[in-house]
Image (cartoon, helix red, strand yellow):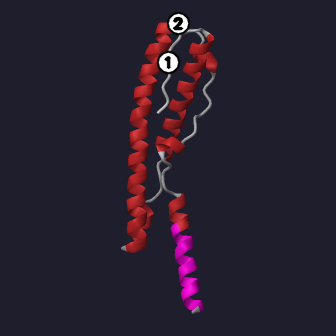
Amino acid sequence: MMKNTYKLAALAASVSLMAAGCASRSEDVGAAYVSLTTYQSYNCKELSLEAQRVSSAAASAAGAQDSQRTKDAVATTAAVVIFWPAAFFVGGDNAKTAELANLKGQMQAIEAASIQKKCGITFNRA
């Protein structure tokens, strides 16, 4: 009975450690700080165009982030259920997460600059 308990505890600990390395969901990635001064010299039209560019890049980065999360989840499941060496393929992607966080920070800074300049640009949150 105790032997099974130890095995179960070891399995739970292993799964927890592997899951910790998984990529975050895109909506769980926080925005990195981007200074408002980056966009101080932009006029309203330039802010609007930059917001569109950054929004498009952020959507692409969010898709890549969620795709990595799915791959990590599959590798974790395979590691636990089928083949433990698959655990070595779980690790998230810090570069993708950092890129998404930076893009989210840029959008916040663009929005703040737009509000400060009274541009009237509408920023929709997904």
Q: Position of residue 83 (x, y in %)?
A: 37, 73
**Within-10-Å neighbours for mark 1: few <14, some 14–19, many 20+:** few
Of the residues tagged 1 and 2, which is closer to the observer?
Answer: 1
Query: In whole angstroms, how far apart are the C-alphas of marks 1 and 2?
Result: 15 Å
Residue sitting at x 39%, y 40%: 63
Q: Position of residue 102 (x, y in %)?
A: 54, 32
Residue for badge 2: 43
Occupied quadrant, residue 113: top right
Between 94 and 123, the residue placed more toward the observer is 123
What span is in magenta?
Answer: 2-15
Q: Which mark is residue 19?
A: none
- Horizontally, residue 126 falls left or right of residue 116, namely left
In the image, residue 11 lies in the stretch drawn in magenta: yes
Q: Position of residue 109 (x, y in %)?
A: 58, 22
**As displayed, is residue 4 above or below residue 37?**
below
- For label 2, the SS is loop
Residue sitting at x 39%, y 42%: 64
Residue sitting at x 39%, y 35%: 60
- For label 1, the SS is loop
Q: Earlier in the sequence, mark 1 or mark 2?
A: 2
